[in-house]
Image (cartoon, rainbow, N blue to C red):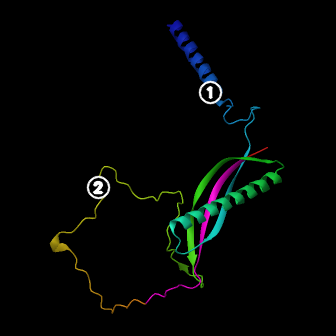
Amino acid sequence: MKSVIAAIVVVAAGLVVANMLGTAAAEAPTTGATGPSGVAARTVGVQGVATVPLPQSANATTANGVYRQAMANAIADGQSKAEFLASKVGVTLGAAQSVAEGGGSIECKDGESEYVRYEGEQPDFGRVESRPVFAGAAAPVAPVAPPGLQKKPKRSKHKRKKPKAKSAVVADVTCALSTQVALVYSIG
């Protein structure tokens, strides 16, 4: 009986030691995240931002061109920020390690600083709108009351307003497309 207990203790101790060695090997530096000297690669990450004017009724080609110009301006802004940060900590800025598109938005205002609807086509902001997806089943339908229990619509006692004629040109409408780009640069 004593020899069985001693064997169990020896096996348990062996497993503990093997587990510790396995953990130490897993925590050793890897070559993927380090430089050639085995030292972790140093980077600086920044957000470049830019805003560019956009015609209120832009077509898709114009909107995409303006969006691409805004992304180029955002990259230049990000590089400027990264160079500033690198100089402040006494290192040199290396090559870009990663670039990520951050999407964008369009805002229009009239001459009185009131928000106005953008009437043009949307550029390819690179993001998918989040809409519920119902895979393999129909979308849920609102319940309908039985015919005898349905409420009748109330009639308004107010006179309906006649729609005002739209002016041919809305004066002083300015639209701006804003975007951002995430950048990571190596530093040395």
Q: Which quarter of the figure has residue 108?
A: bottom right
Locate residue 17, reporting x and y percent. 62, 20
- Asked which quadrant contains residue 143, the reply is bottom left
What secondary structure is found at the residue carrying circle 2? loop
Judge from the rendering whether residue 86 lies leftward or rightward of residue 167; answer left or right: right
Q: 96 or 157: nearer the eye?
A: 96
- Which stretch did the figure color magenta? 165-185
Q: Amino acid at mark 1?
A: Thr
Q: Is 85 drawn above or below residue 107 in the view shown?
A: above
The x, y position of residue 32, in whole percent, is 66, 34
Tag 1 and tag 2, C-beta contact below 8 Å: no
Residue under the point 22% across and 77% down:
151
Q: Residue at x 64, y 69 (%)?
A: 52
Quadrant of the drawing holding the C terminus: top right
Q: Nearer the viewer, residue 173 or 35?
A: 173
Q: Which residue is mark 2?
A: 138
Q: Earlier in the sequence, mark 1 or mark 2?
A: 1
In the image, taking residue 48 as reference, residue 154 lies left or right, namely left
Q: Which mark is residue 44?
A: none
Q: Is residue 183 magenta?
A: yes
- When the figure is inspected, residue 76 is found, relative to residue 33, above or below; the finding is below
State how many labels appear: 2
Q: Is residue 78 left or right of residue 91?
A: left
121 is within the stretch colored magenta:
no
Of 37 and 163, which appears nearest the observer?
163
Q: Residue furthest bottom?
A: 159
Label 1 to label 2: alpha-carbon separation: 49 Å
Coordinates of residue 160 in the picture (x, y in percent): 34, 90
Q: Which mark is residue 23?
A: 1
Q: Secondary structure at mark 1?
A: helix
Q: Residues within 10 Å of mark 1 (few under 14, many from 20)?
A: few
